[in-house]
Image (spheres, rainbow, N blue to C red):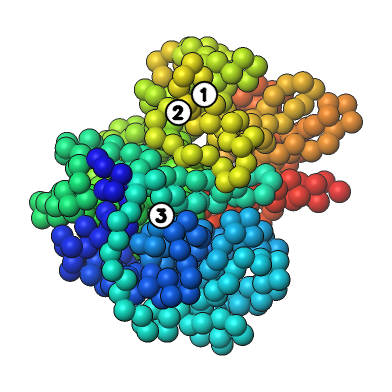
Amino acid sequence: MSSLSENWATLWEALADAAPDATAVVVGDRVLDWKSLDHGAARLAQGLCDRGVLQDMRVAQLMYNCPEYLESTYAAFKLRASPVNVNYRYKAPEIAYICDNARAEVLVFHGSFADRVAEARSLMPSVRVLLQVDDGTPLLDGAEWYTAVRDAASPMPRIERSGEDVLMLYTGGTTGNPKGVTWRHADLFGALAVAQYGTAGVEAPTTAEEVGATAARLRASGSSPVMLVAPPLMHGTALFLAIGAFVMGGSVVLLGERSFDADELWRLVERHRVTQLSIVGDAFARPMTEALEPGGMSSGRNLSSVQRISSTGATLSADQKRRFQAAMPQAAIIDMIGASEGGPFAIAMTMPGDEPPETAVFTALPNVVVLDDESGQPLPWGSDQAGRLAAAGPQPRGYWEDPEKTRSTFPVVEGVRYTAPGDYAVIAKDGRVTLLGRGSMCINSGGEKIYPEEVEVAARQHATVVDANAVGVPDERFGEAVALVCSVHEPTDPDEIIATVKSQIAGYKAPRYVVFVDEVYRAPNGKADYRWAKQAALEGLQ
């Protein structure tokens, strides 16, 4: 495929031309077809161009889920600029950090964030244009209404673009400042589209027009997905899944509420006959399955359209897989290890009628190895030594203006470039992967390495534990000791939880302390926030 065809604006234009009246995206109660999405993005692109936004510039997005989010993403692509995601949980200094680090020229924001934007303004001097999405909040001084800028402009003429254009995706990670992951459009096409064509038994298109024609053909045959993405668009998972669904002729359904609402999710599944669900681990699964239980708000809904439930980014427990099976016995359940930096690395697939596998046990994909920390070389499958999960194949160029971190995360071994974001695991001879957790959060207790994931998975096997994070806290004798921050259904003796952990993994890995909280905090995408967990542990142990 030529570089021109691999540009996402050009691909989306081909999709809009091939099926202008097809539904592109649903956000809550708002439905947008491809013709409307393309027309609105072209007008916004011209409005931004009139304000001096050019190729390679960056458009920051501080928004809840809304059609304007995808529209402004598309507009940036049309200009050969890059959208930049900003976590809506961030306070003013964090918003300023992202915009300043990315040197964003534009900030598109919901009006409810106006106070934070005003506070951050002096700390992000590169931002020249403020576009406010109307949600009932008065217009911020110095900002323009998003709709006014868009609607006053004529549609921008289509231009020639390149697959070398870049999408910058900020990932918060578990420690340190957020990092900008830079993906070429061509590499994203390889990562998100080519494998899907192969799985569907479809020959990969070689031109943008063929992408549109293939999508229309799949839609006409009833093979296109209707994908509900539960995480918000501000996280890379949601945008990447939308991109992948679009090229298959699919529609994307997004939640419209500003906090996760399981009943809204199931209502949208039923109304739009959703075929694929994408979630992030038990943080999403638990309220979803509870809503389906007898007496739950979504009990009795018709969910027969669901063919697949996919989870990536956090562990989906065997218990939650069983609950999904009970509610939707026709659906396959796919648990994946992936990251903003690439992948997937491994997969656990439960087909209808299967007994769910163990929690956090996956099968490595053929292009995956674990890299030894000391030598940097791949360890043979079957070694009992833990290493960094690494995958060859389509991957980002690296981290924005951070060559040292790029070299570390994307090592070249024997001529092969890998992406290795930091998840540690052991791969058995038959390819079974036991995920241990992020190396950056590895707990060193008396010289023994203890990975949070294995402690958390073991703790969640206790009947009363709802969620848990394991962190290291200072210990005079061993340097660090394991503390478990957890929420429970009912009052529980900490020693019972510790005993449950010891029954499944080595005793030295068991928590010495258990700190109970009302709720284990997770980011809106379901991922653990270990900085919060460590602070909660330290405060609970005072």
| Quadrant assignment, res 174 | top right
Labelled disc at residue 312: none
Whole-angstrom CA distance, mark 2 to mark 1, is: 11 Å
Q: Using residue 456 as the reference point, say whether residue 155 is left or right of it.
A: left
Q: Are marks 2 and 1 in contact (CB under 8 Å)?
A: no
Q: What residue sits right under mark 2 in the picture?
A: 391
Lower sequence index among marks 2 and 3 = 3
The residue pinned by badge 1 equals 412
For residue 239, the mark is 3
Q: For the residue carrying disc 2, how many other residues have a C-alpha within 10 Å: few (<14), some (14-19), or many (20+)?
A: many
> At 55% from the left edge and 15% from the top edge, which residue is drawn?
377
Which quarter of the rendered picture does the N terminus lie within? top left
Residue 461: give x, y in percent of width and height: 55, 36
Q: Secondary structure at mark 1?
A: strand
Q: Amino acid at mark 3?
A: Leu
Residue 244 drawn above or below residue 447: below
Decide if residue 266 is in sight here. Answer: no
